[in-house]
Every structure is written in structure tokens, then in C-alpha cells.
Image (tube, rainbow, N blue to C red):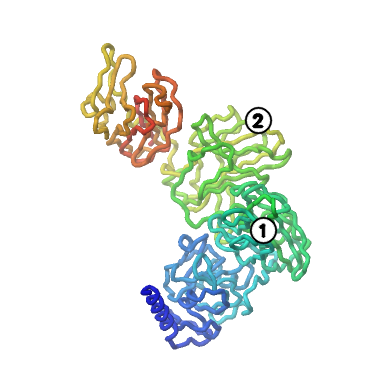
Amino acid sequence: MKKILNALFLTLLAVFTFSSCSDVPAPYDILGEGDVPGLTGDGTKENPYNIATASLKQDGSVAWVQGYIVGSADGASLADGSKFEAPFVGASNILIADDVNEKDYKKCIPVQLVAGTDLRAQLNLVDNAANLGQVVIIKGTLENYFKQAGVKAPTAAVLNGKEIGDGGEPTPGNVTITENQPYSASFASDLAGFTVENKVSEGLTGDVWYYSSKYTAATSSSYNGTTNVPAEGWFLSPVLDMTAISKATLTFEHSSYKEGKPEELMLKIRQENATDWTDLVISNYSNGRDNHVTTTVDLTDFASKKAQIAFVYKNEAGGSDNTWYIYNLKVAAGEGGGETPDDDPFGLDTSNPKSTFSADFEEITAINQNYSLEGWINKSIQASNVWQTGIYNNIDKYIKATPYNVAANETMEVWFITPAFTVSTANKFTFDCAGANWQADMTLKVFFLQKDANGVVTKNEVTVAQIPTSGTNFEWVRDINVDLSSYNGKVGFIGFQYAVVSTGVNKNLPTYQIDNVKYVGGGGETPGTESVIFTETFGETLSTGSTEKFAIADFEEWTNGVGLVFSTTDPSKKIEIRRTKTISNCVWLPAKNIYGFKIENINTTGYRDLVLSYKILPNTLASSGVKANQANINVKCGEQMMTIPSVELTSTSEYKEVELTGIPEGITSIEFISTENNLVGFRLDDITLKGKK
């Protein structure tokens, strides 16, 4: 009861606070710097809501709101994408606030600017930087936008005393398309002014079509959280005013959880206010959520008219229970769907450029799966194949591109694209590459991709002579360097483009593989000469006699000669140095002992591309049903636990050499740690750390 009374008190206090102010600003008055709209208002044009009141009244009603234009958002969230200073790159919205100096997105209201409208053309900060700091009065629907209180589908505004729009009720409305003004919609943060009509939705907990923040797409599904049910939903565009153009093309990016079927995933069009819809052909469907495809549709029959398109999802009883994702679309003048200069077929995100990154693909667990890595793009442009996973000999993991199951004479084009990054002379870009079954028209090219504030993507090919084009199948070329010196200071992406014309034969497929993609320290240098930082072989081997054993703390015949410190975490001191005349000197890691042997005081200053190697030998090959495996001993470099490939050991007399790459730079310690799966006992020898300067 006490909590209820407290809540009532706070509610009454809020009502009193927001209803007791006076001083109503006159219609269209532009407030001076530092002035804050002081009234709650009543939501009319003459007495608009301020930001505080509009934030509370998120009930889907239509109202006028007043605030300072303080920024815009670029990306899927305000937390990551809010920008309060020029240059601005997000034209689809503005942020308004009660304080002209506001820099906290939580105290702002995001306002949607629908593509193709006068409001977007005259209010967005990309094209109208002088609007920053100006007071705007805007009419729209008060509802959640960017996951917080917002204004959506605005139809009218007043800026600097100038009327914009018509002041009518927010509806999907018309968007105008001209020769120089295409219509683009991205569903990365919301449904972008599209409307949803449920035809069959009984058994669902929400709409058939909805915005998915997880997949940043307009999404349709028949799944209700427990099972799939029959469902049909229509995803309707605004009315497209194409009266000024004679030819038109629709391009959209999409994918589906399963192989798309034309009777379940459909596209339709109708003339404005017509009853009948015309089916449009979707020429290519996705076969997996990560397999984004771009479809082009000729709309010329509806050019010179006003028309509306609909994406239709239908899952009947016994259907495939698919899920459809629409990421973005564009309608432009022209025919054939040729890529217009400002197309972004990849969905590039420049909002959070990285300084360094790497991908070694060691997380791969199965072969021939469509590869996905957060922040990276795996995208088919022609045919539906994307980069897939590969594993060789249970150790080497990579991604590969092949025209498997691509029809004869069909061109395949697929891209693998890094996250956005800022080019710096302190870093360099390298990767490993292998090829096989060479074909004359088979290519792997490297591009530096840039996306400007208007969404224009520029593809600049970077010549990389080391990419193999012939020779031994599947032979790796390591540490291929990509020269980015001419782009220093620029934000961009590296795109790997694989292309080939399929023969239709699924044998000896023309293949490219890539691995160890890195943008890390070492830029501006030529590949350094690898040198040994230290080697430890544990002294001279006995020529006669039996086994000798030494506690780590008592052993004095270390061979590294560089002042390293050796120790063990084993309180029983069973981890020790052993030497015999039949097996070379070694560190002994006994069975059922979960402690470690540690080397400290390692100086790796100035070294990069560190490589650790060591030899391992089991005492027996199995115990209690557990087989000896090199992964039974963990390796920790600095604070990073390394991934040890699982390899069964088959000899108790010949050491197996293990080599680890991806060692963190600047480490000062290495520790070998016995795991609970060590049931046989292991010997370690010839520990070597190398690096390049």
C-alpha cells in the first residue's frame, strides 16, 4: 500500500508540475538562445507540447511539438549513433530537445523524417547544417522511435517562421520520385513509414510483420514463441508518386531463414486506390538468414502513375514455417535495375569505425556452413552462394568461396567485408590466401570501400600482386599485405570480392580461401624479418645413467640466457625438470595435476606477429578411456588463454610440435597449464617464441 501511495503522490506531483506553468509563446515565435519552452502546451500549433510533455504523452496521438534541433542519429540506436556536432551523416531523423546545448540523447526526442518528403529535404542536418540550434515546431504521431519517446510520420513543421508540409494527418502519404530523387527506405531502426496489415494472425502474440532489433530488419514470421501457426501479413509502402518519371526500378535487400518459396514470400503492386494487386516476380531468394540477396524488379508499367507496393508473407498449414527479413529498398528512375551511383548494396555502417580488428576463424566448428561474424558482412550479389566455413585436418580453419550448385553459365559474385575502420600509418592490413582448381575467369579482388554522407558507396580496387592465380592447389600464401597508404586518415572498409562464371559441374570447383584477416600494428613497414625472442631446451641430455629430476626452483641449467624467470603454481612441486639418456630434457606435467609451469620476464617490446612453438609427448596414449591429446595442456599468453587445436597423440617416443599464432603483442609471460583431462602425464620441450620487428 505504501508503494501505491508513493506512486500516486509522484503522479500528482508530475501533473502539478507540468500543468502549473504560464507564459505561452506566441505562434511561430523563435526563442532566443538559452530560452526553453516553458509550457506543457496542449499539442496545438499555437500552443505545442514541449519535450518533457511529449515524452510523457506517447499514446499514438497526433500533436505539435516544439524544441531545439540539437543533432541526429546514424545507426540502429541512439546510444551508439547520436551526433550533436557536424559533420552529420544521418538524414532520416533529427533530435530535438528543450535545451539548445543538450548532448544527452536520453533528454532528446528523435523525430522521423520520411524519405521523399519536404520535411526531410528541409530539416535534415546533412543537407541543412545551419538548422542546428534552431527551434522547430513539428506535427507528427507521438510514439516510440529508436526505442524511446519519439515523433513519427510528421506532416508539417515551422522553421524560422517558414511553413513546411501541409499540416494534414500523418498517413503513409505520398513520396515523390523524380529523375534525380529516388526513394530509399532502411529498416535498420524501424519500419520506416511502412504499414502492416494482418490478414491471418490468430495464434500470434503480435503482428505478422514487425521490426526486429536483433536482425535490424522488417521481419515477418508465423512463430508465436512456442510453435508456428498459419499466418498472412502485408507490409505496405507509402504511395509512390512516379508521375514525373517514365521508367522505374525497385531494388531491395532481403534474406530468409529457409529457402524462399514464391507462393509464401511475395511482392505485389497496385495503382493508387485500386482494388486489384499485380504480382511482381522475385527473381532470387535467399537460402539462409545470413545469405543476404539483392533483388531487382522493373516497375516501368507503373511509372507515370502513383502506386503502392506490398511485401506479402504467407504461411499456410503445412507450410515451410519460414521467416522473411527485408533490410532496405530503393525505387529509382530507370529500368533494368542497374546500380545507381548512390546504391549501397552492402548495408555499410560507418557509425563506429574501429582502430584495429582481426578474424582468424578459429570459432568455426563445422564445414560448408554460411559464415557469419558480428560486424562483418558476407553478401552475395550474383547467384546466392556466400562465403562458407572450411576446416582442414581438424586444425586449419578458414572461409572459402566456390560456385557449388550454381547453374552453368551463371555468374557468381560474393563479398566478404570488414567492419569500418580508420586507416592509420601505425597499422597494416594483412591476410592469408589459397586457391585451387584455377579457372581463367576466376578472380579474388580487394577493394577499399567508402560511404559518404549521402550514402554513396565508392569501390576502389587495391592491387594485391601476392594473391595466387595459379600453382599448387590449396597452398597458402601468408601475410599478404594490402597497401592502404593512399587512404591514410580515411574511414572505410576492405571488401574481398570473389567472382566466377560457373560451369555447372560440382567437381574440382574453382576455389578461393582466406584466413587470418588482420588490421593491427605494424603499418608503414615492410614485412619484418622473423627472429627468436627466446628458446628453452632445458640443458644437456644425459649420456649415461638413469633419470634425474629437479624441482623448478632448484634447476640451474636453463639454456635461454636472457634472464627469464621460471616457476610453478604446483604446491606439491610435482611439476619438475626431468632428463634421461633416452628422452631429451623436458618439463614434466604429471597426470591428474591441474597446475602450471610459468615463464616470466619475457621482453617482447617492439615485436609483432608473435609465434609460440613447443614440443609435447605423452607418457602413455590413454588412461581410463581418455586418449592423450595435445589440447590436454592449456597455454596462457599474458592474460589470454590460447585455443589449442584438438589433436590425438599417437607416440610415446617422438615429440609432437605445436605452433600457436595470434599471440597478443607485449606479453611478458607464458604459462602451460595441465587440465583435468590430463590423465596420462606429458613432457614439454623446445619452447620457442619468435616475432617480427
Q: Residue at x 48, y 40 (%)?
A: 363
Residue where numbered disc 1 is placed: 231
Q: Residue at x 59, y 36 (%)?
A: 512
Q: Nearer the viewer, mark 1 or mark 2?
A: 1
Q: Amino acid at mark 1?
A: Ala
Q: Are marks 1 and 2 in contact (CB under 8 Å)?
A: no
Q: In the image, is residue 90 above or below residue 215?
A: below
Screen quadrant of the C terminus: top left
Q: What is the quadrant of residue 229 in the picture?
A: bottom right
Most foreground residue, 419 or 252: 252
User: Which x, y percent locates residue 314?
Assistant: 69, 56
- Point out the tag, 1 or 2, that comes first from the N-terminus: 1
Is label 1 in a helix, a strand or a loop? strand
Asked if residue 430 can be seen in this view, the reply is no
In the rendered view, does 474 fall on the left or right side of 306?
Answer: left
Is label 2 in a helix, a strand or a loop? loop
Q: Residue at x 26, y 28 (%)?
A: 574
Give the Cα separation between the discs numbered 1 and 2.
43 Å
User: Which x, y percent locates residue 248?
Assistant: 73, 61
Q: Residue at x 59, y 80 (%)?
A: 163
Asked if residue 242 can be seen in this view, the reply is yes
In the rendered view, does 521 fall on the left or right side of 394?
Answer: left
- 10 Å crowding of disc 2: few (<14), some (14-19), many (20+): few
